[in-house]
Image (cartoon, rainbow, N blue to C red):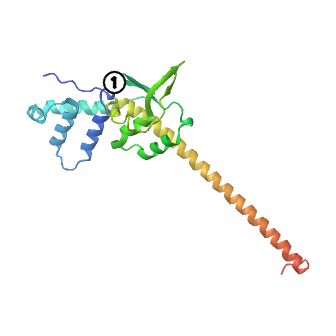
Amino acid sequence: MKIELAENQYEITLGQYQEVMKLADRKDLDVFDFSKRKVKIFTGLNYKQISLMKYSDLEDMIHTIDKALNTEVEFQDRFEMSGVEFGFIPNFDDIKAKEYFDLSTYDTEVETLHKLMAILFRPIKDKSLGNYEIKNYQGTKEWSEAMRKMPLNIVNGALVFFLNLANDCKNYTQRYMQEEQEKVKQESTLKSGDGMQRFTEWRRGKSGGSII
């Protein structure tokens, strides 16, 4: 029986990656149980078939899977899945409140990556001169489960881009908040100084020009 294994992240789905990460979090599996389950995720072989194979073959499979999971990726703003072309949010300056809130909610936790991808990528509805528009955001319900089948290289490329953008936004927000706090402090100081000046003038007037 010929078994084909993924050679790069393009041949691995997000759903498979999520299953492997669940395995990695389990504390009740020994090395063999973990290896069997990992191979099953990527080959479809049952546990009996895996248990009867040569140990060297099992070891080679694990090595091939790990190598594929760690291949380098680049950001791609479009991909096709099940006959539908999806595009990454083309302009974050125009992001809507609901999109922003949901992006902040789901963050980059592995178990909710399919929901995050359903926000970042949506079906393309129009293309012109190399640009594109995606469908309006209606929540994650429609496409989140489908996103479990998207190629892992698209996911990881998008995460790198998104995290860099999020860090830029965070730094901008922090600078903005610091600037606003400084403005508030300055305005407060000016107001306090103005009030003190008026109070001093009033005291001088009451005391005939001297400060009591």
Residue 134, x across and y down, in percent: 48, 28
Does residue 99 show up?
Answer: yes
* Res 2 quadrant in image: top left
Q: For the point 87% across and 76% down, which residue is it?
A: 204
Mark 1: few/some/many CA within 10 Å (<14, 14-19, 20+): few
| Secondary structure found at label 1 | loop
Direction top: furthest residue: 129
In the rendered view of the protein, which quadrant contains the N terminus?
top left
Residue 202, x across and y down, in percent: 85, 74
Q: For the point 78% across and 68% down, which residue is it?
A: 195
Residue 33, x across and y down, in percent: 15, 42
Give whichever of 212, 97 is nearer the camera.
Answer: 97
Give whichever of 161, 203 is nearer the camera.
Answer: 203
Residue 170, x across and y down, in percent: 53, 46
Q: For the point 18% across and 24% down, which residue is it?
A: 3
User: For mark 1, what is the residue?
Assistant: 82
Does residue 75 show up?
Answer: no
In the rendered view of the protein, which quadrant contains the C terminus?
bottom right
Task: Give the answer, above or below, for where 72 lies relative to 176.
Answer: above
* Res 129 quadrant in image: top right
Q: For the point 33% across and 43% down, which residue is it?
A: 111
* Res 9 quadrant in image: top left
Direction right: furthest residue: 208
Q: Count all numbered tags in the image, as a single digit.
A: 1
| Amino acid under disc 1 | Ser
Left or right position of 66 against 192: left
